[in-house]
Amino acid sequence: MSILSWTTNESLWKVEPLKKLFSFEKGKNAALYTKEYLYDNPGEYPVYSGQTENNGVMGLIDSFDYDLSECLFTTTVGAKVMTVAHLKGKFSLSQNCLIMISKNNKFNIRFYYYQLMCLFNYEKALIPSHMQPSLRMEDLKKYKILSPSSIVQDTIVSYLDNKVNNIDNLIKNQMILINLLEQQRQSIITEAVTKGLNSNVKMKGSGVEWIGDVPEHWELSKLGYIGRLQNGISKSSEEFGFGTPFISYGDVYKNEVLPKNASGLVNATAEDKKLYSVNYGDVFFTRTSETIDEIGFASTCLETIPEATFAGFLIRFRPTTNRLNPRFARFYFRSALGKRYFVKEMNLVTRASLSQGLLRNFTVLLPSLEEQEKIAVYLEQKTKAIEESIILVKNQIKKLKEYRQVLIYEAVTGKIDVSDMELD
């Protein structure tokens, strides 16, 4: 897309290619900046990757490659492709980033930060969901962008910095509320699936550090003793986007109960559909992630999805006994127990991938089927109000982000005149 398609009421604004305004570089020594390197070399200077939620900071090291008064950088590949940021000071970049250094110290670099934010959001919306998003330096250089006078740039930036900061604070407060609600929900679930519903029941030691005491009459089992594990399907990128339903990593990561409608499609054979089927009672675990904390997220299938297969980044657990109620499994495997186990044990195995062997040794608490059903009914009722509150707050955040995006777009394209507007 070219920003030429945007219109402006400011006749003096120029349209210029980015390569006229900025010079471009890839991160230096990029291959060195792995998780292991950052873990073993802590320091004070950030390494930016754009792939994390921590404002793009991948980690800290004791050296740096750039020392700049200010610049822009953008991520070039992955889920957070075209994530643009405004940087200052001493830092380094990982292999998935480009740095943009201004050629003219008279213009306001934050104006272009806001404008690229709009442009990139539009571009990302055009990328098919089954494709690996990417951005090439040569393509970025050709992007055309609007350039008003430096006075207009300063006025727009001053206005947006104030307005956007106010909106971001509102979003931050809403995010804190969501976190508190999710913690409350998680606490209720973990208490029920480890202690049961009778506070007067006699307890016994589970013998498992991350579980603690459990009701005396409950059984304990390793996951591998009550079912089979299977890694997902592996296909070339050309096989996706058509065919039969495909359960993605995101379907599992984002949902406690597997969606009835899979988010993707894959060209699967009859043998694929038999080996990688998705049936009632199956539990899927995320197998790989950027961080240990995101390993082992579980989603339970409560309704068979005909013809479906599932991603290679997932592990399917399929019960081979009738000792586990799927409605109970939904809450058990998504409780804090999984995270406690995986975070503890992954330090002994690997920092980035969950093996079938580790998952097979995951301890499962097994009340009677009747008690499992009672716990499931209790949790479904108890968590419903919390889930509705979370949805409401998320919708408010969505509206704030949409308003934020419209405000930035209209300001940086001259659709609103901010010169006479009062700041809060």
Image (tube, helix red, strand yellow):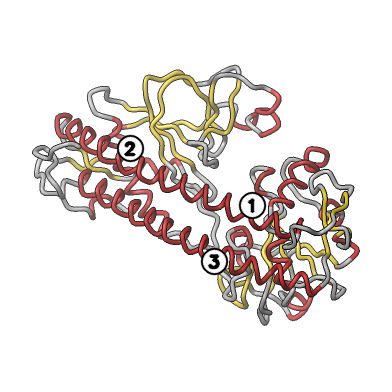
How busy is the neighbourhood of tag 2: few (under 14 within 10 Å), some, or many (20 plus)? Answer: some
Q: Residue at x 88, y 67 (%)?
A: 226
Three-letter code for the amino acid on which mark 1 is drawn: Ser
- Residue 322 vs residue 295, the one in the foreground: 322
Closer-to-camera residue (124/298): 298
Question: Could you say which quadrant of the image residue 327 lies in?
Answer: bottom right
Disc 2 + disc 1, Cβ < 8 Å:
no
Q: Residue at x 64, y 65 (%)?
A: 379
Q: Earlier in the sequence, mark 2 or mark 1?
A: 2
Identify the mark nearer the N-term, 1 or 3.
Answer: 1
Q: Is residue 55 above or below residue 265?
A: above
Question: What kind of element bears circle 3?
Answer: helix
Q: Which mark is residue 187?
A: 1
Q: Is residue 115 left or right of residue 148?
A: right
Image vertical order of residue 280 relative to residue 220, above or below: below
Asked if the residues shown at circle 3 and circle 2 are in contact, with their CB atoms under 8 angstroms apart, the answer is: no
Q: Give the label on residue 384, or none.
A: 3
Query: Which residue shows up at 50% across the image and 32% down it?
Result: 26
Classed neighbour count for the residue bearing mark 1: other residues with Cα under 10 Å, few (<14), some (14–19), many (≥20): few
Give the x, y percent position of residue 117.
35, 44
Q: Amino acid at mark 3?
A: Lys
* Residue identified by numbered label 2: 113
Tell me the quadrant of the picture where the C terminus can be found. Answer: top left
